[in-house]
């Protein structure tokens, strides 16, 4: 080996040692459980939207969240519970956005149109939500059905639609046998 090569290699080792010492002298970063949980949830949403429950991998979720593989289990219990939490988070965001709508004073046909446009725009602006819901529905929605929280979150949207349909039926704009279930399918 040439003498100048040895010097370069020694310089690299010294640099690494100095960098290591510099990081050792810095104060320890406090743990952030809420931040870790949030990062896991967001990373899981991306993974589940891309591959569904069965295509997503916990190790990839942990890597995206910049945490170790045990943390998703620590915070959520299982992959299935994490998937349910992702669905609940997504439906919470949709319900919060829906609360901004004020359709009480709007004519029934216009109200239905605005509600449909609102939901369409939410799915268009958040395609991951659409992919999550589609994937869940392909498997007959066991996690949505099993979550009381999601059913609570969906209730305001269904109640809004029911009020609009009722107003439209009284005004003879909609058929009397039209139900919210029929409107969603």
Image: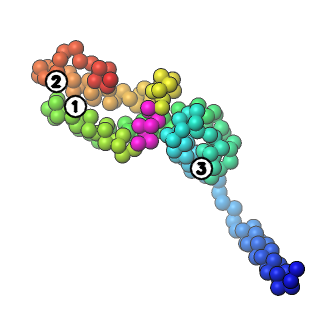
Mark 2 neighbour class, 10 Å CA radius: few under 14, some 14 to 19, many 20 or more: many
Res 12 quadrant in image: bottom right
Say left or right for 147 vs 178. right
Numbered disc 1: secondary structure: helix
Numbered disc 3: secondary structure: helix
Q: CA distance from mark 1 to mark 3?
A: 39 Å
Q: Earlier in the sequence, mark 1 or mark 3?
A: 3
Label drawn at residue 112: 1
Label drawn at residue 29: none
Q: Are marks 3 and 2 in contact (CB under 8 Å)?
A: no
Label drawn at residue 168: 2
Q: Are marks 1 and 2 in contact (CB under 8 Å)?
A: yes
Dot 3 corresponds to which residue? 65
Main secondary structure along the magenta-highlighted residues: helix
Which color scheme does this rendered protein use?
rainbow
131 part of magenta stretch = yes
Magenta-highlighted residues = 127-134
Outermost residue, front side: 1
Mark 3 neighbour class, 10 Å CA radius: few under 14, some 14 to 19, many 20 or more: many
Residue 38, image x, y percentages: 54, 47
Outermost residue, top side: 177
């Amino acid at each position: 080996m040439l003498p100048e090569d040895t010097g370069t290699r020694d310089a690299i080792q010294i640099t690494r040692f100095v960098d290591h010492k510099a990081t050792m002298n810095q104060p320890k970063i406090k743990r952030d459980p809420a931040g870790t949980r949030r990062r896991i949830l967001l990373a899981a949403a991306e993974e589940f939207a891309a591959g569904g429950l069965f295509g997503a991998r916990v190790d990839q979720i942990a890597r995206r969240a910049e945490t170790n593989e045990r943390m998703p289990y620590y915070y959520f219990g299982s992959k299935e519970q994490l998937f349910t939490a992702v669905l609940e988070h997504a439906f919470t965001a949709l319900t919060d956005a829906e609360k901004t709508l004020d359709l009480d004073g709007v004519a029934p046909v216009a109200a239905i149109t605005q509600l449909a446009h609102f939901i369409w725009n939410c799915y268009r602006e958040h395609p991951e939500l659409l992919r999550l819901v589609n994937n869940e529905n392909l498997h007959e929605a066991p996690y949505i059905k099993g979550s009381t929280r999601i059913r609570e979150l969906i209730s305001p949207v269904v109640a809004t639609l029911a009020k609009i349909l009722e107003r439209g039926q009284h005004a003879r704009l909609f058929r009397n046998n039209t139900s919210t279930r029929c409107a969603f399918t």
